[in-house]
Amino acid sequence: MNKVVSGAEEAIKGIADGMTLLVGGFGLCGIPENSIAALVNSSVKNLTCVSNNAGVDDFGLGLLLQKRQVKKMISSYVGENAEFERQLLAGELEVELIPQGTLAERCRAGGAGIPAFYVPAGYGTEVAEGKEIREFNGKPHLLEQAITGDFAIIKAWKGDTHGNLVYRATANNFNQPMAMAGKITIAEVEELVPAGTLDPAQVHTAGIFVQRIFEGKNYEKRIEKLTEKASGELASGK
Amino acid sequence: MGLTKEQIAQRIARELQDGYYVNLGIGIPTLVANYIPEGIEVVLQSENGMLGMGAFPEKGHADPDLINAGKQTVTIQPGGVFFDSATSFAMIRGGHVDLTVLGAFEVTDTGDIASWKIPGKMVKGMGGAMDLVAAAKNIIVAMQHTSKDGQSKLLKACTLPLTGVGCVKKVVTDLAVLDITEEGFVLLERAPGVSVEEIQKATDGRLVIRRDIPEMQF
């Protein structure tokens, strides 16, 4: 068992032009910063990136977009990125927008060996175009197909040398379903520990889904929208 | 004249019941959290992976790993829990969320909703809105009754790309509270100082007025 690699550069070896990458994170929360930086420093291009969002102009997947390394984005929400919008309107970038829950489940299904499944989301909308529709319990559903990636690139809080992963707070998000759906899954973690250190009952992603793991460096963990009590009492919660 | 955004949120909060799991969308729906009635406990679901969403953090205590679906830094309440996106939407799709409150550009008298795209102007994506409206047991829309140039947003048919069909159950606007039934929009309450005639004028979809319509109290 040797899943530990020296760093992001070694981890992304084998990622080639035209491949499909599943990239974990929600907004800038829980994104694989080190691996994205390594991809930006590589010459790989024409990538199809499956990611809930597309980063912001100067961070996250936005960095790959700036360098024109992405041919197609498959996402649920791509606001917050002006360069993305420019490339989209100029016809330089293909975009497929998918309802968020359907996107998460398509990845989970891809990792779980379920080639397709029915969901109600998107019935009667442009998302349904060209898809098989079938009624269950009197309600119409769309047939949605699983997504897998040549590579999945994800971020966890702690991981061990067997690839077992624990996420922190809402930084789990798409990392867990995407970890399952990569032919090769690269996990970068804030803290890499020896196997046997993590409580087996508290592991979120079992190491069987992870092929390469490394401890990342210099996490910026940029906050997309800083909201504090002093900056606005009208918030979420009692 | 008409309700403020805060008052729309305050009115929607009266629909909450003890033990409800609620998903609040971005914008006016988020404000509903500020008006949860005394003595009842409501658990807020954030579709990026949290139950028990709390208030914004104290100054200097923001945690980049702890955000809501609007990407704002938040806190978690006692009894709250984190999970992944697939599990989050299992809660939504599986009908475990009691109430969804979201905004909209347009709503129809049959419960269709358009909320995610303005062709040629705004293409940001639907996020979780299509999953939420397709599956939630109860959906309340918070919106302005008319556009800035006075066009009705309560229509017979949406002009913008749909988010979902036949799913909205109730609409709370700056002018009125309306249920959506087989007969169309059923007027339940009117904003203080707003007449039934004004609501009729501002509503393009079928409008049912069954009785004397009470004024909302604040």
Image: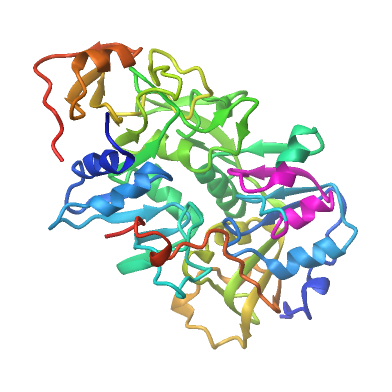
Specify the quadrant of the image occupied by residue A143.
top right
Q: Please, which residue is most extreme toward the right here?
A: A43
Q: Which residue lies furthest to the left in this view?
A: B212
Q: At which x and y percent is residue A12?
A: 80, 66
Taking the spot 44% from the left edge, 52% from the top edge, the residue there is: B47
Give the quarter of the image for residue A157. bottom right
Q: Is residue B143 left or right of residue B15?
A: right
Q: Does the magenta stretch include residue A70?
A: yes
Given residues A89 and A125, the one toward you in this image is A89
Residue found at x 31% / y 59%: A237
Q: Is residue B170 at all visible to an observer of this figure?
A: no
User: In the image, is A141 to the left or to the right of A68?
Assistant: left
Query: Could you tell me which quadrant the N terminus of chain A lies in?
Result: bottom right
Is residue A141 something that shows in the picture? Answer: yes
Query: How many numbered circles does the render carry?
Result: 0
Q: Residue A70, image x and y in percent?
A: 80, 48
Nearest the viewer among A55 and B153 is: B153
Viewed as shown, does residue A106 lie left or right of B214? right
Q: Where is residue B214 in the image (x, y as percent from the top left)?
A: 11, 25
Magenta extent: A58-84
Q: Quadrant of the C terminus of chain A?
A: bottom left
Q: Residue at x 24, y 26 (%)?
A: B176
Q: Which of B112 and B197 is in front in this view?
A: B197
User: In the figure, is residue A108 to the left or right of A82?
Assistant: left
Q: Which of B74 and A162 is in front in this view?
A: B74
Q: Position of residue B158 (x, y in %)?
A: 46, 18
